[in-house]
Amino acid sequence: MADSPESSTTDPTQRLLAAAGPVFAERGFDRATVREIANIADVNVAAVSYYFGDKMGLYQAVITAIREKRERAYPTPVVGKGTPQQDLELLVRTLLSRMLAADETGWEAMLMMREMQHPTPAIEGMIRGYFRPLYDALCKTIQSLLPPLDAKSSWQTDALVPQLALGVVGQCLHYRIGRPVMAHLISPELMETHYGLDSLCRQITASTLAACGDQNVIDQHKLLKPSPLNEPQDVSCQQ
């Protein structure tokens, strides 16, 4: 395997990381084996435990490397220097850029999506170092865009801001994982013209600003009738 990409460096840790990423992305953590990874990296299988402790240590190192790479390319903006509207656009652009970034390896985005859908203990580090800073900045910015909230309404004081922030995240995530479906719904010409980074950034920012302005989201929420479903049968995000 002297001519393989994983063997192009003499550093065994880098060779293991390069070999492990595609295997974890394709098979998932549970089905990936240390022996296969070591064979691809052309190192002794004991090197995994020596350098990373165990398979989970190697997996977490791979996830961390992807996260740090994208953080360097698209760092979390510092909010508060401009207007809230400008801050929101910067945050949306950062989220979209991280999610839509070209993946020259072909497996990085796949592995990150797999970890979010089938989380392992590595998800805690992803949330703490990758998602939480942007989420907190989004909540802070959205809070500053909203009118004064009714202190007597638990939804307004406890749930409105997180729901709006997660709505922004959800839109950005959709444009990453929903691309195959969009390709069947939207013509290639429109995809190229109106579904690039700049167009999507403006659309998500504008719709969020519209929801926050003039109590629109609060007034519309009040107008919606309660669900006819009984509470035990209601659909929720809880598992």
Image (cartoon, rainbow, N blue to C red):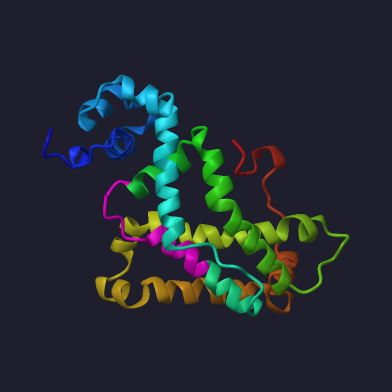
* Above or below for 115 versus 31: below
* Above or below for 230 versus 48: below
Q: Is residue 94 magenta?
A: yes
On screen, residue 4 versus residue 220, left or right, reads left
Looking at this view, is 211 or 173 the one in front?
173
On screen, residue 75 versus residue 208, left or right, reads left
Q: At 60% across and 68% down in the image, what residue appears?
A: 78
Is residue 91 visible in this depiction of the protein? yes
Q: At 85% across and 66% down in the image, what residue appears?
A: 150
Q: At 27% across and 50% down in the image, what residue appears?
A: 105
Q: Pick out the residue farthest to the right.
A: 152
Residue 237 falls in image quadrant: top right
Residue 217 falls in image quadrant: bottom right
Quarter placement of the C terminus: top right
On screen, residue 227 versus residue 201, left or right, reads right
Is residue 174 visible in this depiction of the protein? no
Q: Pick out the residue farthest to the front.
A: 10
Looking at this view, is 211 or 78 the one in front?
78
Quarter placement of the N terminus: top left
Q: x, y (%) of residue 194?
A: 36, 76
What span is in magenta? Answer: 92-107
Q: x, y (%) of residue 9?
A: 22, 41
Q: At 42% across and 58% down in the image, what residue appears?
A: 99
Q: x, y (%) of residue 164?
A: 64, 62
Residue 231 falls in image quadrant: top right
Looking at this view, is 48 or 116 the one in front?
48
